[in-house]
Amino acid sequence: METVPLTPGVNRRQYRMTTNLESLAPSNMQPKPTTSLTAERPALIIEYTDPVEGFKGWLVRDRIYHRMCAGGMRVQTGLTCEKLTCMARNMTCKMRIAGIRVDGAKSGIDYDPQAPGKSEAVARFLRAIKPYVETTYSMGPDLNMEMEELENIAGGIGIPSVKMAIARAQGWELAYYLERSSILQEEEHGWSVGRLRAGYGLAAAVLAVLHFTNIENSEATVAIQGFGTLAKACASRLHSAGVKIMAIADIEKCLVATHGQGLDIPKLLLTSGPLLEVKGLDDITVKPSAAVTAAHCDVLVPAAVENSISADMASALQVKAVVPGANLAVPSVSSNILQNRSIIVLPDFLPGCGGSLSMEGLFGPVHHPSAGAVLQHIDQKMFAIVSEVLQKSATENISPTTAAFKLCHEEKSLPGTRPYGQP
C-alpha cells in the first residue's frame, strides 16, 4: 500500500488514505481474472479516527474500474477494516453477477449501535468522507443503519442524499436524481420500496431455489434467522408467494410453528422493532435463538449477521438448501461441508444483491418507473440469475459458488460508462 496525499484542510489524525496502485487500471484495461474476484487488495482504503471518542471508521473501495462505487454503511462493535474489505469485495461480486457497471465498496464505524451518541458519531464520520459521498461513493444502509436514518443524518451535514453520487455518474442534474430517487419512499404492500428491496431480492433467490428443486411454493417450508428489515421483507414476500415460514429467530429467541401452516407472518410483522412479539400468537413454541438452525424445513435463510452458520451447524442442518441474505453468513468451511452433504448453498453475494438490482430497476429506465416496476425488476432478474447459476452448477458438476464466480468473470468492465441503463 502507498500513502496518497490528503485533501487540503483535512486532519491527518482523522483521515488516512491508502491505495493499491496496481489496481488502478487504465480505462482501456480489463481486470485480470482471478479465481474468486477476491484475491487482490482493495484499491482504496480511507481510515478515520474520531476526534471526540477515538473510535475508528473506514471506507473501502474494492476496485476502481468505473465512475462510481456502491455499498452499505454499518455501525458495529468490533468492526475492522479487514471485515469491510471482505464485504467490499462481495459488493464487487454482486455488481458483476448482476451485470451492473459499478465497483464494490463498504463503509462503517467500530461503534456500539445502542450508544446514545450513535447519530453524532455517524455524522462526524460522514463529514470526513463527504467528498466521496458527493462524487463517487453511493452509500446504502447496512447492519444497524436504516436508509431513512442515514439520509436524515446526511441532510444535517449538507449532503442532499447519501446516494447522490449516482446523479454525477449518470450525468443527471441533482434535482432530477432526487425526483427519481423519491420513488424509494413510495409504498407497496404497506412498506416503502427502500425497505422492501433487499428482502425482496432475497426472497426471489429462495423462490428460484425452490423452483430448481421442484418444490411447489405451497408445499415449501422455510426458516429465517434474523428479524431485521432484510428478514422481515423476505418473510413478507415469501408469505405472499404461499411459502410457509416454519421458524424465525431474533437475537433472543426462536419461534417455531407447531402446525403445518407455518407462523402467522402478517401478525408478526406488526412489530416495528427487531425483536419478535410472542403475545397473541397461537400454535408456537418459543426456543433459544440458535434453534432456528435445527428447524426441519426445505430452506434455511441466514439473514442476520456474518459467520452465523458454524461448521458444527453445517454438519447438522436438515435442509435442502441454504440461501444467505447476510454478508459473509456462511464461512467457506461451512459452505464446503454443506456442499459435501449435497445441500445447495448459494454464495452470499448472489441473494444479497437485491439492493443493487433495485438501483438498476430504478435508475436504468429512460423514464421514471413505478414502485411496483422496481420490485418486479428485482424479482425477475434475481430469479433469472439464481436459476442460471444453479443450472450451470448442475451441468458442469461444480458448486453454485464456483458457477457464480465463473459468471462474474464473464462480465466485462466498461470504464467510463454510466452505471445504469444503456452505456
Image (cartoon, rainbow, N blue to C red):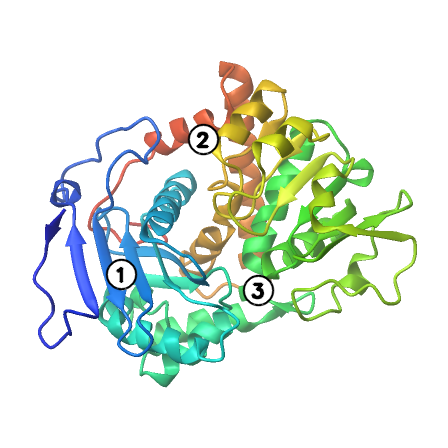
Circle 2 SS class:
helix
Distance (Cα) linking label 3 and label 1: 24 Å
Label 1 or label 2, whichever comes before in sequence order:
1
Residue 380, how many percent across, how many down?
57, 45
Residue 305, how many percent across, how many down?
54, 51
Tell me what residue is drawn at x 16 percent, y 45 percent: 20
Q: Quadrant of residue 220?
A: top right
Circle 3 SS class:
helix
Callout 1–callout 2 Cβ contact below 8 Å: no
Which residue type carries mark 1?
Ala
The residue beneath circle 2 is: 404
The reply, left or right, for residue 49 in relation to residue 5 is right
Tell me the tag on residue 195: 3
Tell me what residue is drawn at x 74 percent, y 44 percent: 291
Which residue type carries mark 3?
Arg
The reply, left or right, for residue 392 in relation to residue 15 is right
Tell me what residue is drawn at x 36 percent, y 77 percent: 123
Tell me what residue is drawn at x 33 percent, y 68 percent: 55
Circle 1 SS class:
helix
Closer to the camera in the image, 280 or 314 = 314
Q: Nearer the viewer, mark 3 or mark 1?
A: 3
The residue beneath circle 1 is: 169
Mark 2 crowd level (few <14, some 14–19, many ≥20, 10 Å Cα): many
Residue 101, how many percent across, how many down?
32, 48
In this view, 39 is above or below 256: above
Distance (Cα) linking label 1 and label 2: 27 Å
Residue 399, how many percent across, how many down?
51, 22
In this view, 185 is above or below 293: below
Q: Quadrant of residue 402?
A: top left
The reply, left or right, for residue 274 in relation to residue 19 is right
